[in-house]
Every structure is written in structure tokens, then in C-alpha cells.
Image (cartoon, rainbow, N blue to C red):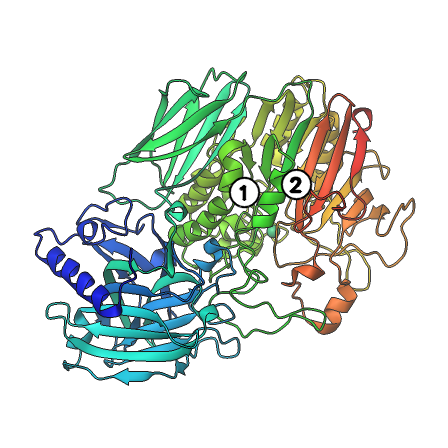
Amino acid sequence: MEPLSRREFQKRALAASLAAAFDGHGGFAQRSALDSAEPVPPHVTRTWLGPHFWANRLQDWRLHDGRIECLTGAAGDEVRTVSWLTREMIAGHELAHLSVRAGLIEDAGDGGFCGFLIGAGAGVLDYRAAALVQKASGTGGGVLCVYETDGSIRFRDHTSEDQPLAFAELRSRTLAAHATLDGRARVADVRLQLDIEPDARGRFSITLTARDPQTGIDIAGATRDDVLDADLLGAIALVSSPHTKKAGARFWFTDLRSEGRKIAVRLERALGPIVGTLHSLNDDVLKIGAQFMPIGESDPQSARLEVRPIGGQWREAATATLSPGYTAHFRVENWDRSQDAEYRIVYGASMYDGTIRREPSDRAPLTIGLFSCAIAAARSLEGGRGEPDLPDAELLGRFTSKSIYFPHAEVARHASHHHPDLLVFAGDQLYENSPTRRDNSLTPTLDYLYKWYLWVWAFRELTRNTPAILLVDDHDVYHGNVWGNGGRPAPQGDQNRGGYRCTADFVNVVQRTQCGHNPDPYDPTPVDQGIGVYYGAFRFGGVSFAVLEDRKFKTAPIQGADLDVHEAELLGPRQERFLAEWAKMPEGGAPRICLTQTLFACLQTSPSGRPLVDFDANGYPKLQRDRAVRLLRDARALVLAGDQHLASVVRHGIDTFTDGVLQFSGPATGTSWQRWFQPADPLPNAHGASTGDFVDAFGNKLHVLAVANPKITFKRYRTYRPGRSQGLGDRRLKSEGYAIVRIDRPARAIVMECWPWDADPAVPQARQFPGWPIRVPFDEI
Ligand SMILES: [Fe+2]
């Protein structure tokens, strides 16, 4: 197709828009047919904007009456964006046109602007991360091309690290308007057209015009010249914004179009209605959970699971109704585990497919991938000046891969190289304050989903074809720390006094979305407030696994009159009984594996190298910790966990330093809070730095086999960062990645591997963290 000139594109866009206005429907589906692979039914109201769009944030936008509407113009809600996932500005001295119809919904008083954000991610950031560009400016933030409530067209900078909310006006030429409209009429309903045109010097002129959609007459326009190609590349988004720190305007959009060789169409990047799937296999019981976008009440509320042998005939295996949290859960008994099978989730005209691989033989090696603690971004996308954490650290550009760890692409790619048979995500799949502020309401469901979807999106190619067990940790339920107190509400919402600060409905949504596909619980009786449980046992690949919830029953170190217990709890009587039963279940020719959130000790030292007290880990309460370690020893279990952000392998001790179980705490996928284990004096029986016999701050004995400390000492960190913070963003100074556990049945040994996120295991010289791999014969587990 020949490239269209600006005028030609304008004529076509206007004609289409006028035709849509007179077609008697006026719905989004008709107007945007060119850009939408799946028509959106007219008159639908829902949070999810459709598969072409990613909303920042989820709760700030909705689809309503055929329009995309921004729901907030509140002070502090600057630059709400909707990323157009299926379009990308690419390199080349070519034309690009964007067009959208837009209008003011309301103005709380101080005005604002609407239009396009281009150049998001600068063409180098992963498209999923580039889709998050919003609010606070920074490197890779792009340029705002906007129509404002004062009737002017402006170009505003979105790349400033120093003044992240200034949105400074960039130089441009104002074009003569052919018509002038008064006041609010100017922004009630306009067609905005952005034309990107190559100039004679290898650069570009970008022109934004606002037109009366009925007459086609220009109301306002401006051109910015001498724009570099590099400043245009990357994601394209719609923008609705009040002015900085003022309550102002919010806008609607419809009939979004693009044209020109400079814009690539990426239909494969569409997302939803099904974002991803999770599944587990427990003997012959298959469970699959499908995570949906927030569909509307008028959308279908049920989905179908279909399966077939590879290349065979599809048959319906189960149906499910969507539950709160927009999940559909399917359970299939008598599953044939002896061969690979394909599955697909069928929802209306949409499908999401994958493979259920045959269960690994109970004589072959079994490989487990262990992950935890995946923060979306080191820096907030909502504010804060860009400056290095420490003299040793570098500035992490806000919209660069140095700060936005999401979608954790290296971890997903490198872990898949090991072909894990089972994935374990041990908690903190998200952090409630990343990449945006925490919604402080007691049922922050949409805010949670916004962050949870990032995790699903990041890992969905891994979980599509590999069984996954998920455990919920503190940040998943919007806590910094959680002592569940058996499900009681937190007194005055204070997490430090134990219990849950959010509603039970919310906690259950979190658990359902993350753990609803896990094998059935041992005893499903809910705890206080009706909060569900998921601890239990399952068998996979001939190995007996236990899943613990070490947070839920644990009592808080601070107890007031509002907690009617005298004895501290760790696992609680129910899980202790369960562990005793698990020890009697058949072992199956390999050690049992226990999956839990955190470490049964407090493996931390202070900047001066002395043991640190941290009630959050399971070194506290000591008596109950000893009981747990004994029960796990009786089960002859290897314990796997996450949480710590400090990868380690320890042998727990009760009476001696080595009479307990082995525990491997995996590294963080990528997070902020750092911990250190660097004792001031060498430990007895050491075999490398920071290893040997150790007594933690609660008096627990243990033997440390390996630890992956941050690459900067705590002492040096504290020199530059006084106070209590232990946050660190620069990944060069941290030890983050994932763990691989190989149950090598032919050799009767377990091999524990600990991999840096950026080490490509396909490369022969790729190295694990110092101290790994660790090989332990079955008889010594
Ligand atoms: Fe964490």
C-alpha cells in the first residue's frame, strides 16, 4: 500500500468517523473494526478495555458505551495511559499517522490534556514493560502529544528524571486554526490526528491537529520539527491527564486508528480475555486455573476446558463458572498421565491453549524450578527523582530495563533452558507498591489484579505447558509482613499485631487467583473469617510433596488483649498434625519435598556482622520452629522456600548443628529489600565465606552450606544509606535469579543449583552463584 499523506489520512479517518456516526449503532465495535481483532459489543460497560489495550492503571479506566473512559482526573493521577499493545513505532524514515476521537468527560476545575504518548520505552524496552509507561517522567518516557483544555496543542517532555511531574512544554510551531470554539466546547468532542512525517534532513516533523469531527474544520494544531527517529520509537498510548498536582480533567476516546509504514501491527501481542493459565497434577487429578481480564457483567460468565491427545479429537473435559478475581477453575479426575495432551480453554470465540505433559517417570530425574519475589520495577512509575542508591550504583532510568524488571524475561528464558518438570513459585509473585502505589483500601481487588496480571503475563509461556505450584506470601496479600494469627483481622488494621489487614474476601481472591489450581488441600476447613487454606500433600513424578502455609497460623510477636491465645504458634496444630500424617504417606523412592514460604531460622547479620532479630522468618518462635524441624525430619524432607531475597542452603539443627533437615531458599527473581549473612568472625566448620555452624538471634542452631550475599557488604551499604532501609535497585550489586533442584533418581542424589538471572545456562562458561551446585546423596537428606 502507498503511504498516505497527512491530508489523505485525515480525509479517510473523517469519512470513516462520519460513517460510523450515521450507522445507527455508534458502537466501539463498528468504529474501530480496523484496529480490533475482536469486536467489542456496543453498550458494554466493563474494566477490561479489550485485547489491544493495556490500561495504566486497571482501576483508572473503563469501557463504557463504545468509548474508552478515563475514570480519574484527581490530583496525583497525572498521565493515565492506555497502551496500544498491537502497535509499535519502528525505525525508518517513513510516514506514520494516528487518529482518535476524544472528548472531555468532566473537569474538576483545573483542566488537563488528552492525546497520544509516543516513544514509550524508546524502542529498546520489552513491549510489555513499555506498555506500563505512565505518570512520572524518566528515561524512555517518550513525548506527550496532547490537546489541552485551554484549546492549545502542546508537546510535553516525558523523559525528565529531575522533574518527573513537570511535563515541560517542548518547542513547537502553532498552526493557524480555521475555526475557533469557545471554552469547554473545544474539548467536548474532537478528532485528534498525529502525523509523523520525514523531513529532508533525516529527521521528522510531528503535527497534532484537533478537528471538529462533524465539519472536519481544524480547531487547533501545532508542529514540532527536528525530531529524532530515536525519540519516536516504541510503544504508543492514549493519555488522559489533569495538570500536575491539581484536580482537573478526564477524557474519553474512541475510533483509534493508525496508518503508515512507520507503525508496525503486532496482533500477536494482544492480551486477553484469558491472560494465562496455571495447572497442577496430583496423581491422576488435573487442575487448571484460567486467569481472565476483568470482563463485564454482560459478557459470558463461564468457560469450557477441552482436551485431546496430541493431534487427536477435542473433547470437553469440564466447564467452570468464573469466580471473584476473574478465574475459572477446572478439575479433571482419572486424567491419563501416560501421554502428552493438548488443552484449550474456550470462552466465547476466544481460546487459550497449551500442553499437559505426561507425568515424568518415577525412575527418571525430576527437575524443579524454584522462584520467588518478583517485583515489577525497582523505581516507582509514579514519582521520585532519578539518582543512584549509592556511589557504587548507577542511575536506573525509569523506563529502562535497569529499573523495570518486569517481564523478568531473562529469568523466564534461562529457567526454561533447564526444562523443569515442575515450577514452584514460593511467594511474593508481586509487590503491592510496585510498579505503582498501593491501593490502601481494604479490598484493593483491581489494584491487586493490575499487579497480578503482570506476573501472569511474565510467566505465562512457562506455566502454559509446565505444572506450577504457587504459595502466597506477605506482599501478595498487601502486607509488608504477615503473621496470620489463624485468619483473624489485624487489630486496627495494624499488620504488626498479627492477622490480615485486608478483608477476607480480598485474601480469598488472592489465594484463589494464585493457588486455586494447586492440588486439593489436606483439610479445606477455612480459618478465621472464612479465609481458605491450601496446605496439603500431592504426588507428582513419583515424589511426595507437601505444601505448607507457614504464615497463616503463625502468631504475631506483638500480642494485645485482642488475641485469646497463650502459646505462640508457627505452623499451628492443624499443619503439625498434617506433617505427622505426611511422614506416613508412601515416600516413593526419593526424599519427600516440602514447599513453604520462608526459612526455619533467621539467617541474617547486621552491618557489624552480628546475628539479627527478624520475627518474619521462621526462626521465631523457637520452640515451635524446633517442632516443625523435627516433623520435617521425621518425614525425611528437603525443604524449599523463597521470601528471603538471600539464597542459601542450610542444614537445620535442633540439639546439634546438623541434626535437622536441609533447606534451600531460592534467590529473588528480582526485588528491592536486601539481606546479608556475613558474620564478623569465621564460623566453625566453614568451607567457604559465610558458611559453617551458626546460632541465630533466636538461639536456633544451623549449619550454613552456601549463601548468595549481595555484592556490596551491609557495612558499606549502611555507610551510604543511614537509617533502616535495605532497598537496592542496581542489579549489578545484588544476587538475584532462580533455583533449580534436580532429583536425580538414577544417581540417588539431589542437586541444588542457584543461577544468576543474567547467566545464560546454554553457554558453557555460565556460572552459578559461588557455593553452588550442591549435591547431596538421598541417604544424607
Ligand atoms: Fe519478597
Question: Which is nearer the eye, 257 or 68?
Answer: 257
Sequence-wise, the earlier of marks 1 and 2 is 1
**Residue at screen point 51% across, 47% down:** 458
**Residue at screen point 79% across, 44% down:** 700
Can you tell me whether the CB of the residue at mark 1 lies under 8 Å from the nearest atom of ligand 1? no
Residue 138, relative to residue 474: is it above or below?
Answer: below
Left or right for 149, reference 771: left
**Residue at screen point 30% across, 64% down:** 97
Question: Which label was assigned to residue 641?
Answer: 2
Residue 735 found in image quarter: bottom right
| Image quarter of the N terminus | bottom left
Q: Mark 1 points at which residue?
A: 472
**Residue at screen point 14% across, 61% down:** 15
Question: Which is nearer the eye, 179 or 246?
Answer: 179
Q: Can residue 595 be seen in this view?
A: no
Q: Position of residue 126 (x, y in %)?
A: 50, 55
Q: Position of residue 694 (x, y in %)?
A: 84, 47
Residue 432, relative to residue 192: is it above or below?
Answer: above
Can you tell me whether the CB of the residue at mark 2 lies under 8 Å from the nearest atom of ligand 1? no
Question: Which label was assigned to residue 522?
Answer: none
Q: Is residue 710 visible?
A: yes
Left or right for 210, reference 203: left
Question: Which is nearer the eye, 203 or 120?
Answer: 203
Task: Specify the amino acid type for callout 2.
Answer: Ala
Task: Specify the amino acid type for callout 1.
Answer: Val
Mark 2 Cα-neighbour bin, 10 Å: few <14, some 14–19, many ≥20: many
Asked if the residues shown at circle 1 and circle 2 are in contact, with their CB atoms under 8 angstroms apart, the answer is no
**SS at mark 1?**
loop
Q: Position of residue 145 (x, y in %)?
A: 34, 73
**SS at mark 2?**
strand
Q: Position of residue 290 (x, y in %)?
A: 41, 36
Left or right for 352, reference 576: left
